Amino acid sequence: MPLLSIVIPSYNEEKMILKAAQTINQLLKESNIPAELIFVNDGSKDGTWESIQRASEEIESVKGINFSRNFGKEAAILAGLEFAKGDCCVVMDCDLQHPPETVVQMYRLWEEGFEIVEGVKLTRGKESKLHGMFSKSFYRLINQATGFDMSKSSDFKLLDRKVVDAYIQLPERKLFFRALSFWLGFKSVQVEFDVNERTEGETKWSYVSLLKYALNNITSFSTAPMQLITLIGVLFLLFSVILGVQSLINYLSGHSLEGFTTIILLLLGTGSLIMISLGIIGFYISKIYEEVKRRPRYIVSGKTDSRNE
Ligand code: UDP
Ligand code: MG
């Protein structure tokens, strides 16, 4: 029987670890799927690592990786995938918002020959209106900039060994799991799932972190923001030429120029556009800087299992 690896990034989830491990383990046993559960502790501030260690003593299939600090969910996913030995891997959240029953469904589809099984959100679970609005516009933006429709996509996916190997070979420092599996190609299929409610702990996304995530991912996949700057620049140039011609005509026909307000407005307008443009360019440059430093994407401080050193 082929082995299934389940990668579970965990940050401040001490209350969830054992419960998640038991639930998933139980279900997979009943479905006769041999599996390993890889919990990646992403530098939690609570007792998550201790919980993982305890769970790994209690349940044989549970393994743990401990980060030296918080490197973010993307890094945790990568570490889990690099560690995984399975013939296919599922990435899922620790809070059981991704229903474990769907994992079985994904595995069956994989057995049928699909190489990527995408978990697609049927509903978005409970979230605030503002949050919903925010993510909607984020996805619209991403869709336009990158050409991938990811509005219902999630990090809940099954990847075949081939896909995992392709993914972990990508050299960039900043990865975006959700979109890269689109980018990779392969034979894929979608399964729909209902987002469960979080029972313990709380969501780790603040509005600031969501905004950072959005900016990061748009600039990872597209240079459209830089092209937009050029376009705005051209429009402004056209506008100023028209304004210049109009003032010249006014001057020639004997009207003196008035309009302190217009000048101030134009100054402010161009000033702010220049600042925004510099900001966008700066963002790309800082990204290039991050990439050329070639620092490791995460640092492991311990494991419950000594393989893959
Ligand atoms: N997570 C992580 N590192 C972080 C933030 C989150 O590994 O810096 C994990 C978290 O433990 C959970 C998953 O990513 O398993 C999704 O996080 P969360 O439930 O907070 O996100 P939401 O479901 O609200 O989108
Ligand atoms: Mg969650």
Image (spheres, grey):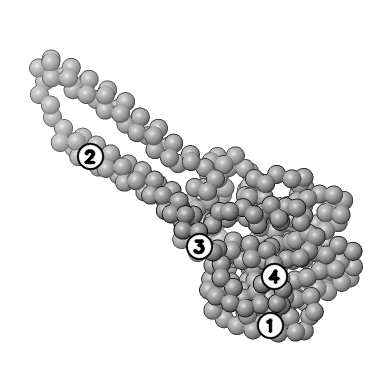
Q: For the residue marked with disc 2, what is the amino acid?
A: Leu
Q: Nearer the viewer, mark 1 or mark 3?
A: 3
- Please state the horizontal and vertical placement of residue 182, each as a whole percent of the image: 66, 46
| Image height of 288 relative to 1, above or below | above
CA separation in Å, label 2 and label 3? 42 Å
Mark 3 is surrounded, within 10 Å at the Cα level, by few (under 14), some (14 to 19) or many (20 or more) other residues, namely few
CA separation in Å, label 2 and label 1? 61 Å
To which residue does mark 1 refer? 53
Q: Quadrant of ligand 1?
A: bottom right
Q: Is residue 137 visible?
A: no
Which element type, helix, strand or loop, lies under badge 3?
loop
Q: For the residue marked with disc 3, what is the amino acid?
A: Arg
Q: Quadrant of the C terminus?
A: bottom right
Query: Which label's residue is closer to the chain start, 2 or 1?
Result: 1
In the image, is the residue at mark 3 within 8 Å of ligand 1 by its beta carbon?
no
Residues under numbered marks 2 and 3 in contact, where contact means CB atoms less than 8 Å apart = no
Q: Residue at x 43, y 48 (%)?
A: 284
| Image height of 230 relative to 107, above or below | above
To which residue does mark 4 refer? 308
Residue 54 sits in quarter? bottom right
Q: Quadrant of the N terminus?
A: bottom right
To which residue does mark 3 refer? 295
Query: Which label's residue is closer to the chain start, 4 or 2?
Result: 2
To which residue does mark 2 refer? 267
